[in-house]
Image (cartoon, rainbow, N blue to C red):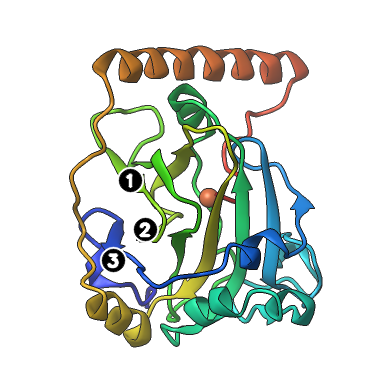
Amino acid sequence: MGYIKSAALEETGYVVLDRYNKPIDPKEWHDIEYVDWKSSGETRFAPLASAKGEIEVNGFWNHKPPRTDKDGVWIPSQVEKAPTLVERALEPGANVGRCRVIELMPNTYADTLYNLHQDDNNRLNPDGTGWVVRGFFNLSDDKDSYFVLRENRTDPSVEYRIALPAGAQVIVDTQRLWHAVTHNGTEPRYCLITSWESGPELDAYIEKYNGVSRVPNVEVPQEVLDAGQAEQARRIAARAAYYAAKGQAEKTAMSEA
Ligand SMILES: [Fe+2]
């Protein structure tokens, strides 16, 4: 039967929506509770919706009973501190799975290439239902930072680099595209990440905010790109050697952005 997917994401695996341009109080993401959760760099996460409404960020398939990344349970103590963030996550009217704010410490393009991963949002997702994709709403104003998306982890020939100023809104099929963020700056980056079920509601939302499947790549000097590529190869080889020595397969997929 197959999954219901958005035609808008078919070409590149992502869409960029109109920029969110209403004022929003930074207290909404500063005052909520974060938990340590290493993923693609130095990160913490503040869940707004989780598997059982508790302040934890584990994949829903790691709970009992295990389930896919849908039907997230809102956490009252977090929701009351972040009403606008919740409103934005609910606006499409699509089923919401995990919904959380990520805090990411500054890193480099080379770190990003090493951190590239695919998500596992559709584990246990019943065939014939909507494919789970993710919305990324940048909250802090990270003018020099950018999302890196690739079809293939180690192949630079298809690489999208999307700017992340405050208000940037991107929806990504994170199970298809390898992804991570280059955060140039001195302060942490904050971004609202929401798992949405694909379907007519999400399609209408993408259309309402003029989603486009291609935007100009953020310009990065060729020497930075080349050095990052070389460093990614070096780190992957070092990691593979480490796991080979331990007699284990290398782990490449992580659960979070
Ligand atoms: Fe991810």
**Residue underneath mark 3:** 17
Q: Residue 210: image x %, image y %?
A: 21, 72
Q: Are marks 1 and 2 in contact (CB under 8 Å)?
A: yes
Q: CA distance from mark 3 to mark 1?
A: 12 Å
Q: Nearer the viewer, residue 100 or 69?
A: 100
Q: Is residue 146 above or below residue 101?
A: above
Image disc number at residue 168: 2
The foreground one among 19 and 254 is 19
Q: Provide residue 245's location: percent of width, then percent of height.
A: 73, 13
Q: Mark 1 highlights which residue?
A: 163
Give the residue displayed 61% in from the left and 35% down from the top. Answer: 41
The answer to whether residue 145 of the structure is visible from this angle is no
Question: Tag 3, which secondary structure?
Answer: strand
Real-space Cα separation, disc 1 to disc 2, in angstroms: 7 Å
Three-letter code, disc 3: Leu
Crowd band around label 3 with a 10 angstrom C-alpha radius: few (<14), some (14–19), many (20+): many
